[in-house]
Image (cartoon, helix red, strand yellow):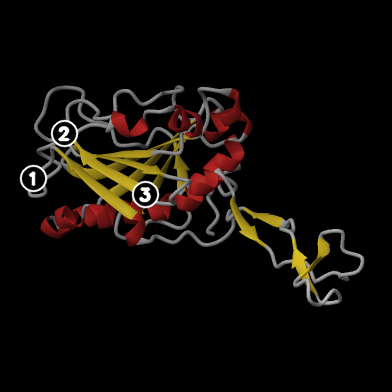
Amino acid sequence: MGTIGAALLLPTKLKPERDREKDPYLRRTRRRRCNSNNYIIRTRNQPQTLTVAARLFGPAIFEASKLKVLFLGVDEKKHPGKLPRTYTLTHSDITSKLTLAISQTINNSQLQGWYNRLQRDEVVAEWKKIKGMMSLHVHCHISGGHPLLDFFANLRYFIFCKELPVVLKAFVHGDGNLLSNYPELQDALVWVYFHSSIPHFNKVQCWGPLRAPSAAAVDVAGDTPQPCAEDCNCCFPPMSSVPDWPQFGSPAPPQENEGLDLRRQST
């Protein structure tokens, strides 16, 4: 997620020491009056070259020490099939730390500020019980809202797919007590919604069970879990816990003979 906001700058090795006599940054100054021929060499600050190293193609690694968890009005002992449970995950490019809020609705205060509105690198998710089956529904914002997101839609989609295993591990680690109390939730399917104003990236994928997300999720269209049309006891919550999330129409169905091309490659 951090690579969406800014590349990491890594300093390269300093340039080899240059000839002192030809170096304009070196100058001689007298050390003592008693010895006019005694000189020392002083160097001014030399510019260092920096190499931009965007960690786009390296492995996505979850570090528990960089995760901060906030519990806001939820009960660890309450099953998400009876009490709404939502995850709001954000990343700081400055500290490289993740903040996970576990609450009944999206933690909107976590998404305020011009930087978050510009980057849109947050991930939100909610537990749902649909026809008696529990599932985790994850939402990512690929593009839409301002032209910059549209311009980098392809790159943003790639990065979100690459970092999603880290996101899911953050959910599991941060809400570990709930999953310990209800281990069957580890077998719940994970549905990922990519929201985009560009039809090609506006799609839904099934990543398999939470305990072992698939390394090659496949696009789906029309096969997402749907709650009962009438009031029932087998679907919960009756309304989505993330109602304010932007929608850009129905996910685009896979094009003919492109089923394999739309698979996310393992990184």
Dot 3 lies on which element?
strand
- Circle 1 packing at 10 Å, graded few (<14), some (14-19), many (20+), is some
Q: Nearer the viewer, residue 245 or 74?
A: 74
Distance between the Cα atoms at labels 2 and 1?
Answer: 14 Å
Provide the residue designation for mark 3: 98
The answer, for residue 212, to whether it is visible in the render is no
Residue for point 58% across, 56% down = 55
Provide the residue designation for mark 1: 78
| Spot occupied by residue 173 in the image (x, y as percentages of width and height) | 26, 57
- Which numbered disc, 3 or 1, marks the residue closer to the eye? 3
**On the picture, is 25 further left or further right than 104?**
right
Q: Amino acid at mark 3?
A: Leu
Label 3 with label 1: CB-CB less than 8 Å: no
Q: Relative to residue 158, is residue 110 depicted above or below?
A: above
Residue for point 48% across, 45% down = 160
The answer, for residue 264, to whether it is visible in the render is yes
Which one is earlier in the sequence, the residue at label 3 or at label 2?
3
Which residue of the protein is positioned furthest toward the right in this rendering?
22
Dot 1 lies on which element?
loop
Which one is earlier in the sequence, the residue at label 2 or at label 1?
1
Provide the residue designation for mark 2: 236
